[in-house]
Amino acid sequence: LLESFRLRRQRSPMARLTALVGLCAALGVRAQASEQALEMGKLRSAFVNEDSFQYYIVQVPSSSNAIKVKLVPSYGDPDVYLSFSAPEPDDLTATWVMDDVGAEEQVIKRDAVDFCTGEPCMLHISVYGYDESEYMVGVFDASSTTLKIESECAPGCKQDMIADGVCQPACKNSACYDDGGDCEEQNCAPGCDEGWVGDEYCDEACFVEACNWDGGDCSENSGCNTGCLPEYINDGECDSECNVAACGFDGDDCFARSTECYGEADGKDYRGTKNTTKSGKECQAWDAQFPQQHTRTHLNYPSGGLGGHNYCRNPDGETAPWCYTVDMELRWEYCNVAQPWQHCKQNEIPRAVQVAGGKMCLMPTQPPSGPLPTFEAKCGNGENHGDICSRECCNAAKAAAAFCANDEQHFGRYQEYKMKVAFSQLKFNCTSCDAFSDFFSNAETILQMGGGSKMIRFADSVGFKVLVAAFLIMLIMLCVIAASIAR
């Protein structure tokens, strides 16, 4: 059940076809490019199978100061990955992700990070189907300085009302894509298909009060807020859906009980709640992409104190805490926080230092928490391409390495699971996570010597897994014997 919490339907965020292409690449077989050309200013109607991708490419004119990507699903739950540098982007390589339920728009300005990597400027788009989906996708010039995501497509119909699961008469016209099909079929919530409630499978889209909290599929208890799954609370990431009083402000994840105490000169350990800049501008939430598009997210900076809040932070080595602003004319600005240690009480330790110092490899809570259980939850059982090849899995592996490598009690369990994940990543040809860089380097040497396909099949065999487990058990026994002799 734990493995099904994090995604709205825990299917691979990478298509089986993509996995096959990746495996072929590992064996030295090149695949033909499959990106379809899109025309600027026009919507393309298409269909994507469950657990599959459709790939597109569009040339952005050099005269465009901004673009707007539109996704309008007729049914199903498609997501979009965007990148100017990586063809066929996925969870590991995308710069921007559109993964809400219903119709979406993503505005990207030319001054955004990685807007164009050269001329001609090409935007790569991947549409992924969590389930069988029909949709329209398009890229439009948005150079106007008065960009508004929630502009009306017809009187009384805003963009966020389309495909929201509710039939809106004002949206039932061609300009608003016939309300994204909302008037044809009524479900208890957007993206929650009939038959998903009570199917013993946790569906995030159905975890709302209107759907009886997915009929108990995610938890025996009722939810505290729409979209806040029980597993999200106190998981080390501030989730905006859980950052409300009814959910206890996401436990300790959203810094509701933090003070203004910090100690580093550049404020990288600041975990206070100041949310305005030096000039008084309101800060934009770190998990928001409007009006400022950015890559300073919890996924990319997992130890930076980011997430579903708008408090000042310094995740990337600036000289002081800062934030993006909600002002279209001012992208970011430093915050007017106090000096280091100025607001620390006697013997008070900064919040970031407390969290890092108090964390153990595995903490005996109920259920168990800490870097090792998080590592196991994020990377899964080794058979799911989307889990194994995700940035969340890589981040969790790094955290586990920091806290488990010298933990005598849990080292065996950690090392065995780490090897399992490493071989699974090799099998799926997602070898960019630097937590396993030594392993991949050694594997590459073996592959260059020949016998690569045999190695991959052997690495995935039951016999190999038994051998690895036996080796680790022997290693642990030898360590115990050595420790006993030393005493």
Image (tube, rainbow, N blue to C red):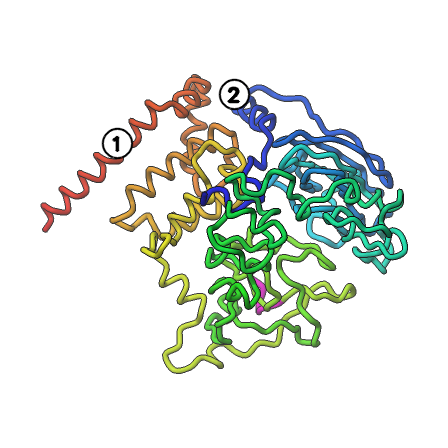
The residue wearing badge 1 is 471
- Front residue of 286 and 32: 286
Residue 242 image point, x, y percent: 55, 60
Task: Kindly state the secondary structure of the residue where label 2 is placed.
Answer: loop
- Give, as a three-letter code, the residue at label 2: Leu
Segment tinted magenta in the rendering: 316-322
Task: Look at the image and tell me in which quarter the N terminus lies.
Answer: top left
* Magenta-span inclusion, residue 168: no
Mark 2 crowd level (few <14, some 14–19, many ≥20, 10 Å Cα)? some
Q: Nearer the viewer, mark 1 or mark 2?
A: 1
Image side of residue 331 versus residue 394, left or right: right
Image side of residue 328 versus residue 129, left or right: right
Task: Kindly state the secondary structure of the residue where label 1 is placed.
Answer: helix
Rounded to the nearest whole Å, what is the CA distance between mark 1 and mark 2? 28 Å
Q: Is residue 255 above or below residue 13?
A: below
Image side of residue 333 versus residue 198, left or right: right
- Give, as a three-letter code, the residue at label 1: Phe
Residue at x 86% of width, y 57% of height: 156
Residue 224 location, quadrant:
bottom right
Residue 216 image point, x, y percent: 51, 48
Mark 1 crowd level (few <14, some 14–19, many ≥20, 10 Å Cα)? few
Q: Main secondary structure of the magenta part?
A: loop
The earlier-in-sequence mark between 1 and 2 is 2
- Front residue of 158 and 236: 158
Q: Which mark is residue 27?
A: 2
Residue 46 showing in the rendered view: yes
Residue 35 image point, x, y percent: 72, 29
Residue 451 image point, x, y percent: 43, 17
Residue at x 77% of width, y 31% of height: 46
